Amino acid sequence: MARIVVVGSINMDLVTQASRFAGPGETILGERFLTVPGGKGANQAVAAARLGAEVALVGATGGDAFGRQLRLGLAAEGIDLAHAVQLDDCASGTASITIAGGENQIIVVPAANARVTPAQVENARPLIERADAVLVQMEIPLETVEATLRLGHRLGVPVILNPAPAQQLPTEWLQLARYVTPNQHELALLLGADPAEDFRALMQRAPCPVVLTRGGEGAWYREQGEPHHQPGFKVDVVDSTGAGDTFNAALAVFLAEGLPTAVRKACAAAALSVTRLGAQGGMPRRSEVEALLARPAA
Ligand code: RIB
């Protein structure tokens, strides 16, 4: 069983489904509203746990009702919350999400996530030392992202940096990660490049190993200097929220099987994740991923 440590955000997602997105200053009627657990860190932790990994989450929730609900949900997935602190003087992170036509728009208010500290990462060192992989994203303070990258690198434990939401980072940080997993837009932001630049050229210029996600088109990665494409799996898209998180979690869980296999399984897991509503709603079990991989090509 893979041992995974996730350092990242825990949010309550406030999801509205509508036939289209509202424009600036416009009010439209939506079709459905629901409150579901999310946050990139929590999502990756849940996806890894459902794929059979032993998972610990380093993060923070507030002292509000959302925080209590989020912790109960994570504990029910079997996730170790010993290093996910509860901050009673603070609200839990939220994400206001609108879904229309299979696309989403998200506004995150970090709240407690803005207080995840490098000290928490250091306290989790005994878990990180024995982990097969560490996952970290960018909805927590950058100093904590840096501390995670440095500790993983020092201990020789692979850290997967999912640079979302993206911003430019020092080259040195990128080189501390075993893999960086942006989409095309995030890769351009990371490198301070033009988002219109061809993604293959961007990957070539990146100062670190990149696994680039391309939504329904699958993923690209470099192996022995050569670019490789793993095509996506065809599914009916209900909600793409959390697909990237599922991809990253599967990549970490299956990393020991080699990059090509891990990327293939990650694409399959991500495809399954978009077939149900809510970031965590469609995250598959290991058996579902295996069933999709065994399915004859259409
Ligand atoms: O990656 C999807 C997640 O991004 C959502 O669950 C939301 O909470 C935001 O953090």
Image (cartoon, grey):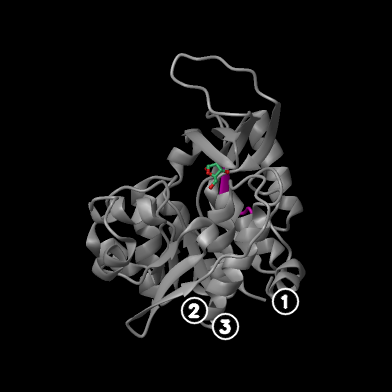
- Number of disc labels: 3
Residue range highlighted in magenta: 81-86
Could you tell me residue 56's position as x and y percent?
Answer: 60, 60
Indicate the secondary structure of the residue bearing disc 1.
loop
The three-letter amino acid code for the residue at tag 2 is: Leu
Could you say which disc has been placed on residue 296 in the image?
Answer: 1
Vertical arrangement, residue 120 with respect to residue 200, above or below: above
Q: Residues within 10 Å of mark 2 (few under 14, many from 20)?
A: some
Q: Name the one closer to the observer, 188 or 237.
A: 237
In three-dimensional space, the C-alpha distance between marks 3 and 1, rounded to whole angstroms, equals 22 Å
Could you tell me residue 68's position as x and y percent?
Answer: 69, 37
Residue that mark 2 sits on: 259
The N terminus: image quadrant? bottom right
Q: Name the one closer to the observer, 127 or 15.
A: 15
Q: Which of marks 3 and 1 is nearer the N terminus?
A: 3
Task: Give me the residue at 73% from left, 44% from top.
Answer: 72
Asked if the residues shown at circle 3 and circle 1 are in contact, with their CB atoms under 8 angstroms apart, the answer is no
The three-letter amino acid code for the residue at tag 1 is: Pro
Could you tell me residue 103's position as x and y percent?
Answer: 55, 41
